């Protein structure tokens, strides 16, 4: 209670005029918009990024992958920042690890 009185006194308001709470009245719509953006845009994007990072860390030699440019291939060698991908027989390319994603074929359940 004493802290509230000190804050209101610093603003030149008294408990009867509602000083600090009155100023927050116009902020509620902005806070609501920020909350909506967080829950519907920012949070799902962060989840997707964590999932992609987890897939990259779990990548191993022999996995089928696709690059951000749309090139499909198999991982032949993994380094810290690069991946060697075989796209055809004896055709290998070196790609930045950040541009390689798990192939959609690997993510779908195996059908027999």
Image (cartoon, rainbow, N blue to C red):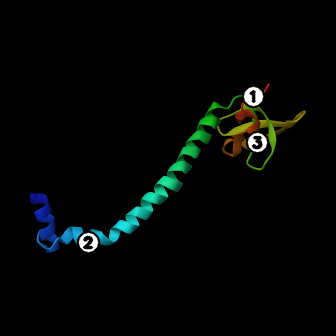
- For the N terminus, which image quadrant? bottom left
The residue shown at (38%, 68%) is 29
Residue position for label 3: 66
Q: Are marks 2 and 3 in contact (CB under 8 Å)?
A: no
Q: Is residue 55 left or right of residue 66?
A: left
Residue 103 visible here: no
Label 3 to label 1: alpha-carbon separation: 18 Å
Where does residue 2 sit, x and y in percent of width and height?
Answer: 9, 59
Regarding mark 1 in the picture, which secondary structure is present there? loop
User: Mark 1 or mark 3, which is nearer the start of the sequence?
Assistant: 3
Q: Nearer the viewer, mark 2 or mark 3?
A: 2
Quarter of the rendering containing residue 7: bottom left
User: Mark 3 or mark 2, which is nearer the start of the sequence?
Assistant: 2
**Crowding at mark 3 (Cα within 10 Å: few <14, some 14-19, many 20+):** many
Label 2 to label 3: alpha-carbon separation: 53 Å
**Crowding at mark 2 (Cα within 10 Å: few <14, some 14-19, many 20+):** few
């Amino acid at each position: 209670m004493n802290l509230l009185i000190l804050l209101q006194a610093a603003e030149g308001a008294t408990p009867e005029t509602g000083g600090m709470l009155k100023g927050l009245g116009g902020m509620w719509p902005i806070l609501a918009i920020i909350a909506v953006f967080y829950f519907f845009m920012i949070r799902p994007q962060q989840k997707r990024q964590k999932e992609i990072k987890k897939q990259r860390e779990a990548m191993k030699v022999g996995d089928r992958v696709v690059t951000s440019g749309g090139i499909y291939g198999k991982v032949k060698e993994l380094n810290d920042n690069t991946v060697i991908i075989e796209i055809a027989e004896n055709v290998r390319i070196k790609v930045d690890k950040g541009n390689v994603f798990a192939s959609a074929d690997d993510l779908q359940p195996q059908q027999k």
